[in-house]
Amino acid sequence: MRKFNYSQIREQKWDSDILRLIAAIYKEAGKQEQYLKQRPEELEKLVEIAKVQSTEASNAIEGIVTTNTRIKQLVEEKTTPRNRDEQEIAGYRDVLNVIHESFDTIPISRNYILQLHKIMYSHMNNPIAGQTKNVQNYISAAYPDGHTKILFTPLAPFETPEALDRICEEYNLVIGNMEVEPLIAIPVFIHDFLCIHPFNDGNGRMSRLLTTLLLYRNGFYVGKYISLEAKIAQAKDLYYDALSRSQDGWHDGCEDIIPFIKYLLGTILAAYKDFEDRFSIVETRLPAIDMVRKATQNKIGRFTKQDIRELCPSLSVSSIEGSLRKLVNSGELAREGAGKSTCYLRLK
């Protein structure tokens, strides 16, 4: 079985790109702290938007979907799920809520990871929810002509419990002793978790939930306000490419983890930049139409009412709708489509 030893990352010299990403994330995290002191109420409204987006995007990456209306009902109103997909979505919502509310009391250990997995399947009858896999799984790609190709073979079921223990122990050791920068240790842990692939089902979703948990525990709260899962879903090919390139040689302990570290740090930084954009719009108390106008100026190409709602969390839906209508009437925006497919386009 592969040895898990973080000594190589303790001693590794990181390239300038990684160091720049880390420095930029710390700078943005510091700015976020100041922003939250200035406009806590307006920015708190971003939390519910991010929860909906995170739950929707992380499940959609795995092909688990429902309508926009039902996603909001499941996440915001905790309505009863109607089918298997909605049961899985409700489970993800529950784990995300636990992490939001109790991250500082959730140790990084196999036992707690198994408990979170069990919660994720609490709305359905899954006999091995909260248990490590009992069959060998594979990471494979499906091609348009119908054939599949195995890209990576994770650890065998009998190796999995010990491996989970080991990555938790190693992570806790380097974080506890402040031997490795957390923004390096977090991608390494998530990458190892995905290579172990400890569950029969739900590995990708659990990895994204654990990413949020580890970031929160290390003082990086951007995922509370901006959905990291949505950022990953927007360019999931980049995610799978970085993961694939970093998995090569993993079983022998000679993988190149750098592509995955750069990918995850780039995603985190992009989320912080989104947060800063949204703060710039709520920073000054403008009339609703001016706030919506400022938000539309941040958009290129077609955008929806929901896109503007994310940028103007302090405004009601009716204020946003009224402002968009005025901007269309004044010739600043064009409206296309109707009903749920309505979108807008800047003309000036």
Image: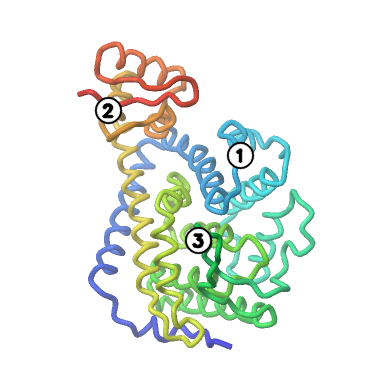
Between disc 1 and disc 3, whose residue precedes? 1
Measure how far apart labels 1 and 3 are at the Cα level. Answer: 25 Å
User: Is 341 displayed left or right of 327 in the figure?
Assistant: right
For the residue labelled by badge 2, is the local secondary structure a helix, a strand or a loop?
Answer: helix
Residue type at mark 2 is Lys
Between 223 and 92, which is closer to the camera in this rendering? 92
Residue 50 in the image: above or below residue 92: above
User: Is 305 displayed left or right of 78 in the figure?
Assistant: left
- Mark 2 or 1: in front is 1
For the residue labelled by badge 3, is the local secondary structure a helix, a strand or a loop?
Answer: loop
Q: Which residue in the protein does label 1 denote?
A: 66
Residue type at mark 3 is Tyr
Residue 260, how many percent across, how many down? 40, 68
User: What label sits on residue 143 in the rendered view?
Assistant: 3
User: What label sits on residue 294 in the rendered view?
Assistant: 2
Residue 14: which quarter of the image?
A: bottom left
| Crowd band around label 1 with a 10 angstrom C-alpha radius: few (<14), some (14–19), many (20+) | some
Measure how far apart labels 2 and 3 are at the Cα level. Answer: 43 Å
Residue 301, how many percent across, how many down? 29, 34
Residue 90: which quarter of the image?
A: top right
Q: Quadrant of the N terminus?
A: bottom right
